Amino acid sequence: MSTKKMLERVLSARRTAQVGEEGDEDDESKTRKQVLLAMRATNHLTRTGYLLPCLVLGLVVIVVSSLIIHSRDLVCISSPSAFDPVSRMRFFGFDSLESHFGSLGVPWCRPKHGKTVEWTNKDLLKGLEEFVPIYETRPIKNNMYGMGFDHSFGLWYIARWLKPDLMIESGAFKGHSTWVLRQAMPDKPIVSLTPRHPEKYLKKGPAYVDGNCTYFAGKEFVDFGSVNWGSVMKKHGVTDLSRVLIFFDDHQNELKRLKQALKAGFKHLVFEDNYDTGTGDHYSFRQICDQFYIRGGGHSCFKDSDEARIRSRRKKFWDKAVDIEELCGPGEAWWGVKGQMRDDFNHSNKAITYTQHFQNSRFVESVLDVYWELPPVAGPSLTHQTRYDPARVSSPIVEDGRFGLFQRLGLSRLETSVFNGYTQMVHIQISKPES
Ligand SMILES: C[S@@+](CC[C@H](N)C(=O)[O-])C[C@H]1O[C@@H](n2cnc3c(N)ncnc32)[C@H](O)[C@@H]1O
C-alpha cells in the first residue's frame, strides 16, 4: 500500500470514529489539516528522493525519545512524584490510559428484565453543556463533605429527565443537593429529611434553604424509614408514586433503604455514595452486587495473585484504590468492607457471611427494573482528579484525549477539587418481586 493510501485510510478511519459525536468539528478539521500537510510533505519528499533518509532519521528520533520517556517512568514509580497527576499520566501512558477504564472490572446489579435507561452518551454531553453554567452559579462554592461536580450533574440530569411531581432527599447537609434539585425542577415541591436544618449553617457561611421545601429537620427530624409516607403524599396531592424521585445521601445501608422505599411503594431512587467494595461507611449496591458471577466481581485474598499485584500497583497512583490487605478482613472476607455490612456512617458494622452477602444480591436483583451508574464526567488526564481508580469505573462521558470537547463544554473553567468526589452515584428503578 502506498504511503498516500495509508494516510488516506487513517484519515477516513478517524472520520468514521467521530461521526455522531457532539462538538467535534474543530478536532476533526485540525486532524484533517495535519494529515493533508503530511501527505503533501510525503509527496514532495518522494519526488525529490529524500523520503528514505527522512524515514530513517524519524525512526532514530522515535527510538531515542521513547528510551528517555521510559527511563523517566521507571523513576516515577518509586519517587514521591508518582502521586502527582502528570507523572501518573506519564506512567500509565496516554494511549493505554483509556484501557484502564474498567480493566479491573466494574460490577453492576442485573435488572430483572435487562432494561436500561433511555438516555445516551450524546444526551449526557448535551446536558453537560447546559449544566456547567448553572453549576457556576451555585451558592455553596466549597461543598467539602457534600457533592462535587460529577454527582451534582448526575442528580440534575436524572431529575430533569424524569420530571417528577415531588422530590424527596434524605441527607441535605448545607443544602447543595436541595439547590441542585431545584435547578432541575424549578416549580416542584421538595421534601428534605436531615437531622440539622440547613439554615443553621447560614450563621457560619454559605448554605441553601429552599422556599418550596418541607423540612423534616432539627426537632422535626424523622428518619426516612419512620415517615408516614401515605400522609406526606396526601398532603402534596401525589397519587402516583412513580412520579416521585428519592435522593439518598444519608450514608445509611442501601439495602435497608431499598427495603424501606419498596415497602412505601416508591420506584425511582438515586444513591449518591455507591461505594466500591472495600471502601466507604455503608453497605452499597456496588458492594452488594460484587459477586463472582459478574464481570469484575468476586475477589480473592490470595497475596500472590494477579489481582493482588495489580491492586498494589494501582494504589500508588489513586488515593481511593485499595490493595488486598485493605480489601480483606478476618477469614479472608472481602465482601462489603472486610466482610462487614456497614451502616449509618460506620457507626454500625456487622460482620456477615458470604452466603448472606450472596442472598442480598439475589434479593436486590429480584426487585431491580433498572440499574444505572453515572459515569465520571471526564477522564483523569482532563480533570486531574487523583482519588478514584479509573479501573473500577465505567468509561467517562468525555474520554481522555478529548481536551477540545472538555474545554468547549466549559469543564476546564472548574477547579480540580470539584472532580474529586466521584463514588459511582447510581440511579435505580424498583418494583416488588414477581411471585
Ligand atoms: C454527605 S452529607 C449530605 C450532603 C448533601 N447532600 C450535599 O450534597 O451537599 C450527609 C448528611 O446526612 C445527614 N444524616 C445523618 N443521618 C441521617 C439520616 N438518618 N437521615 C437523613 N440524613 C441523615 C447528615 O447530618 C448530613 O447532613
Image (cartoon, rainbow, N blue to C red):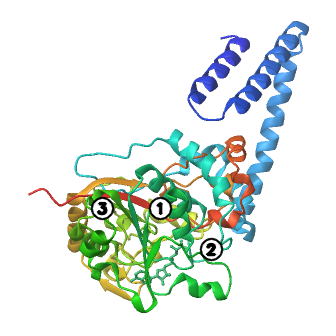
Per the image, the residue denoted by label 2 is 143
Q: Callout 2 environment at 10 Å: few (<14), some (14 to 19), or many (20+)?
A: some
The x and y percentages for residue 212 are 48, 70
Q: Which residue does the image show at 32% across and 54% down from the upper left?
A: 294
Residue type pointed to by label 2: Asn
Q: Which of marks 1 and 2 is nearer the N terminus?
A: 2
Q: Earlier in the sequence, mark 2 or mark 3?
A: 2
Q: Do the residues labelled 1 and 2 touch (CB within 8 Å)?
A: no
Q: Do the residues labelled 1 and 3 touch (CB within 8 Å)?
A: no
- The local secondary structure at tag 1 comes to loop
The x and y percentages for residue 412 are 73, 53
Rounded to the nearest angstrom, the CA distance separating label 2 from label 3 is: 34 Å
Q: Look at the picture and state if 55 lies above or below 78.
A: above
- The local secondary structure at tag 2 comes to loop
Q: Which residue does the image show at 73% across and 71% down from the upper left?
A: 80
The x and y percentages for residue 41 are 85, 17
Per the image, the residue denoted by label 1 is 424
Give the residue furthest to the top: 47
Residue type pointed to by label 3: Gln
Give the residue furthest to the left: 435
Give the residue furthest to the bottom: 219
The x and y percentages for residue 78 are 70, 68
Q: Which residue does the image show at 33% across and 57% down from the upper left?
A: 243
Mark 2 beta carbon near ligand 1 (under 8 Å): yes
Q: Which residue does the image show at 73% across and 59% down from the upper left?
A: 87
Q: Which of marks 1 and 3 is nearer the N terminus?
A: 3
Q: Callout 3 environment at 10 Å: few (<14), some (14 to 19), or many (20+)?
A: many
Q: Which of marks 1 and 2 is in front?
A: 2
Per the image, the residue denoted by label 3 is 291
Q: Quadrant of the N terminus?
A: top right
